[in-house]
Image (cartoon, grey):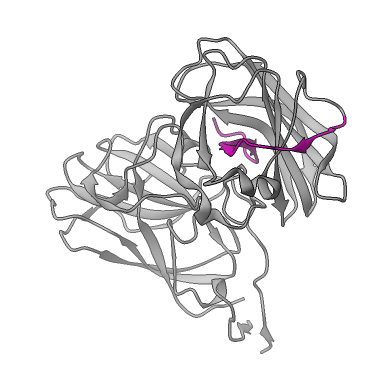
Amino acid sequence: MTLTQVSGYEPVPPMVSPLTRGWGAFPEENLYTGLPASGTYDSGALAVYFPIWVPSVCVARRVWWANGATTSGGATVEVGIYADAGEYKPAAKLISGSATQGTASQAQFVDITDTTLTPNLYWLALQASTNTNTTLLRVSLPSSAFDAWVRMEQSSANPLPATATPVESATASRVYLFGFSTTTIT
Amino acid sequence: MSLSGPQFGLWRRAFSIDTHTHGFFPLLGSSAATTYPVANQAYYVPVAVRQRVVVRKLWVAVGATATGNLDVGVYDAAGVRIVSAGSTAKTSDTEQVVDVTDTTIGPGLYYMALNCSNNTDTFFMDSNSSAPTLGGIGVLSEAVGSVTLPATATWAVDQTVTKYPLMGMFLGTVVS
């Protein structure tokens, strides 16, 4: 009989987002104010980037976002995964997927080429071509002072660029419910 | 056979794995007794099992109204039922504990499953989330048609559910 420690593996969630416990790189989860609620997207063609820590090898099979109460704007919504530049900001785009915003108050999925992610820091990117009648589920930080931890952004980013050139969000404090799925369950 | 040594750290001390503490979403509201969403519809909630454990009992936080039956179980990530209670008369205790066959699982992704034969019995659930928040964290559902959980789940992302059940598994000796 031998004594062993068998733990240490971090199970892979079916849905990964900036709000996923232990995977969203923002550690102060309790600072989010309230539960996700429908709200108008920041501005058209603005890309927002959120850091995630991937602790276990996983395969991104689809990207997804949570539509809010109004989707009549017909925006093209795009979600991407970016590698980290090594200085806590996104660099090269690894994969992305987009579609016209569909049914209100539903999670919307887009198939992507299966993309294996090894343990590392990555960035989830989101952009919508217009913010007119374009709502998504989101939470808020209590102050934009926390933005440097959790969010960067880039204007005129439709489609998502091959290489991100973001800046720290100056005033916005919105964190969206979106990301990638490691399953093909719909 | 080998037995694991003492488990240190927050996760390794766990004697219960449950949908709130070991789920993947940190932003749940407070739980309160509320009616089951849809009769004979199973809900599958993803949980992280971070070590190899023996599941000895399953538990559900239940409310006072108890006229029907429930079933609670554990599924692997492929939708295969690993262990379940079977159809069981629901009680009005604040925590209903059901003995199950001792079953070794983990580490990995698993789903806690709950089904109830009616939509009037009450359970302690977070019911403050807007759809599709829970679908966005991986909560799945299936119209089973009866209360007994299926051997293999035919599940789908639930786009409308706003109630997040509090349930879990009591653990025993870790065996590897």
> Which quadrant is the C terminus of chain A positioned in?
top right
Residues rendered magenta in the picture: A163-186
Q: Nearer the viewer, residue B110 or B124?
A: B124
Is residue B155 left or right of A90 when viewed as pictured? Answer: left
| Magenta run includes residue A55 | no
Q: Position of residue A86 (x, y in %)?
A: 87, 50
Q: From this view, report whether residue A66 is shown above or below residue B59.
A: above
Residue drawn at x 28%, y 38% as measured from the top left:
B37
How many numbered marks have been drawn onto this rendered protein structure?
0
Classified by dominant secondary structure, the portion drawn in magenta counts as: loop
Say if residue B155 shows up in the picture: no
Q: Quadrant of residue A78?
A: top right
The answer to whether one can see residue A59 in this image is yes
Q: Position of residue A57 (x, y in %)?
A: 75, 52
Q: Could you tell me which residue is drawn at 51 percent across and 13 percent down?
A: A133
* Residue A177 magenta-highlighted: yes
Q: Residue A125 vs residue B13: left or right?
A: right
